[in-house]
Image (spheres, rainbow, N blue to C red):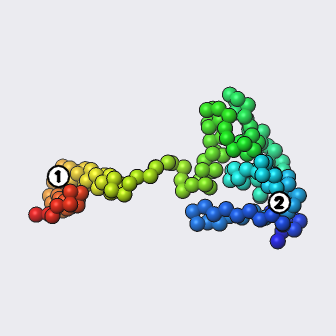
């Protein structure tokens, strides 16, 4: 198997699975040393996640990308790749695109929704559904579409009964 960065024979194989999709990088001994893969303190997965590992990029493109620096603290993209952390609050704005790509690769999305107990999640879903049905009912009444309003009224009754676990009369 060939190295992804040069045409030498690959001897280091990196694999990452995100959302059930497997991504792999194959590197030769020299390229793995250059990227710090064989040095446990030097290798950062962020290097690959933000796409600056050199895969599919020329050395010139990578150097230009690494020139980006935070105006407040001087922190560079190279620091981000090496350390895996930011230097100051302004860095979040400066490296927003990199962070977005990194988070997309590591997680299901870029918006944290947290963990919610199942019962609370169901309660929230029912509450949101009721609000939506109430809005539709109001619009149907304003439009004097009473047939739709009657259907919505019945659906609201059923949804309310589900949320209180009482039988519908």
Which image quarter holds the C terminus? bottom left
Residue at screen point 81% across, 44% down: 63
Where does residue 95 sit, x and y in percent of width and height? 66, 40
How many labels, in total?
2
Residue nearest the viewer, comparing 59 with 42: 42
Q: What is the residue that sits farthest to the bottom in this orientation?
A: 1
Say which label, 1 or 2, has the lower sequence index. 2
Q: Secondary structure at mark 2?
A: loop
Q: Confirm whether residue 152 shows in the render.
A: no
Q: Secondary structure at mark 1?
A: helix
User: Local crowd at mark 2 within 10 Å, few (<14), some, or many (≥20)?
Assistant: some
Q: Residue at x 85, y 54 (%)?
A: 33
Query: Which residue is at a point 28% across and 52% down the rendered structure image?
Result: 127
Q: Which quadrant of the structure image shows residue 151?
A: bottom left
> How far is the residue under mark 1 from the one under mark 2?
65 Å
163 with respect to 30 (left or right): left
Q: Label 1: how many residues lie within 10 Å, few (<14), some (14-19) or many (20+)?
A: some
* Image height of 90 relative to 59, above or below: above
Image coords of residue 5 (percent x, y): 83, 60
The residue that mark 1 highlights is 141
* Residue 122 quadrant: bottom left
Residue 31 image point, x, y percent: 85, 57
Q: Which residue is mark 2?
A: 5
Position of residue 121 measured from the top left corner of the image (x, y, whole percent): 36, 54
Q: Residue at x 64, y 50 (%)?
A: 102
């Amino acid at each position: 198997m060939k190295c992804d960065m040069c045409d030498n024979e690959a001897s280091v194989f990196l694999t990452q699975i995100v959302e059930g999709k497997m991504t792999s990088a194959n590197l030769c001994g020299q390229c793995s040393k250059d990227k710090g893969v064989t040095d446990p303190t030097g290798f950062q997965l962020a290097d690959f996640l933000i796409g600056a590992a050199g895969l599919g990029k020329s050395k010139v493109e990578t150097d230009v990308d690494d020139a980006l620096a935070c105006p407040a603290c001087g922190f560079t993209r190279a620091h981000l790749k090496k350390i895996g952390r930011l230097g100051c609050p302004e860095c979040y704005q400066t490296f927003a695109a990199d962070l977005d790509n990194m988070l997309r690769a590591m997680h299901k999305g870029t918006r944290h929704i947290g963990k919610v107990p199942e019962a609370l999640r169901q309660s929230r879903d029912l509450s949101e559904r009721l609000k939506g049905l109430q809005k539709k009912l109001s619009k149907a009444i304003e439009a004097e579409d009473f047939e739709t309003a009657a259907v919505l009224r019945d659906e609201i009754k059923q949804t309310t009964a589900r949320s209180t676990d009482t039988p519908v009369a």
